[in-house]
Image: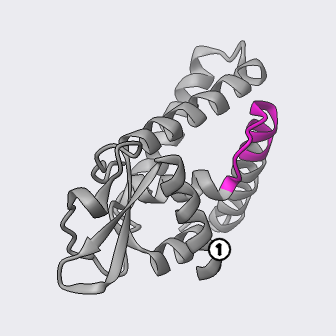
Amino acid sequence: MSSDLPALLGDLITVNHRLARVAAHAADGRESPAVWRTLSVLRQLGPIRLGEIAARSRISQPTATKLVTHLVERGWAARLADPLDARVTSTVITPAGDAALSAWRSELAEALLPMFDGLADAELTTIRNAVDILRDRLDGSEVPAERVPVVASAASAASPAAGTPAGARA
């Protein structure tokens, strides 16, 4: 391992956070960053329990409960009953939530375009390669602590506004 790798990874994290803040500010979004973080977690991991959402989104469990309620009310998530334990539910992103997340990411990218306009082909290739390396290193690194078997029913999985729950996607 290169001796400068820890410093480089620290810089990568710092620059990534700054890039996300600049993009979110420029896009002037109305939703909390926790909404987008949670939808991203649901898209990546599929149906997961509330405690796992809280842990992955780095929020308290009561806050996760409020957040999931908000997402369900917006039609962006649905609660699914656990067929083995009636006390347990999991949350899954809906097609509407998936579309909202994709639209938000497009808004962020559009907001950043002026900052990156005029990059040389070699610079674009460098960014593309860096993204590929990061994706390869991160894919599979986050899995739910425990997979919950879920069975969607018409009553518990989705309201007409919510649509049919979407499966996990990267």
Classed neighbour count for the residue bearing mark 1: other residues with Cα under 10 Å, few (<14), some (14–19), many (≥20): few
Question: Residue 22 falls in which quadrant of the image?
Answer: top right
Q: Is residue 144 left or right of residue 108?
A: left
Is there any visible trace of residue 143 in the rendered image? Answer: no
Say which residue appears at 74% left-offset and 41% top-offset.
30
Q: What type of secondary structure mainly makes up the magenta span?
A: helix
From this view, report whether residue 38 is shown above or below residue 99.
below
Residue 24 in percent (x, y) is at 74, 40
Q: Is residue 121 left or right of residue 160?
A: right
Q: Secondary structure at mark 1?
A: helix
Q: Amino acid at mark 1?
A: Thr
Is residue 169 shown in magenta?
no
Q: Is residue 134 left or right of residue 124?
A: left
Question: Residue 54 falls in which quadrant of the image?
Answer: bottom right
Say which residue appears at 18% left-offset and 78% top-offset.
83
Say which residue appears at 54% left-offset and 64% top-offset.
69
Compare residues 155 and 62 and report the one nearer the observer: 155
Compare residues 52 and 50 and report the one nearer the observer: 50
Q: Which residues are magenta?
A: 20-33
Is residue 29 shown in magenta?
yes
Tally the marks.
1
Question: Residue 163 falls in which quadrant of the image?
Answer: top left
Can you identify the residue that label 1 sits on? 63
Compare residues 106 and 132 and report the one nearer the observer: 106
Residue 58 in percent (x, y) is at 63, 73
Residue 127 in percent (x, y) is at 57, 33
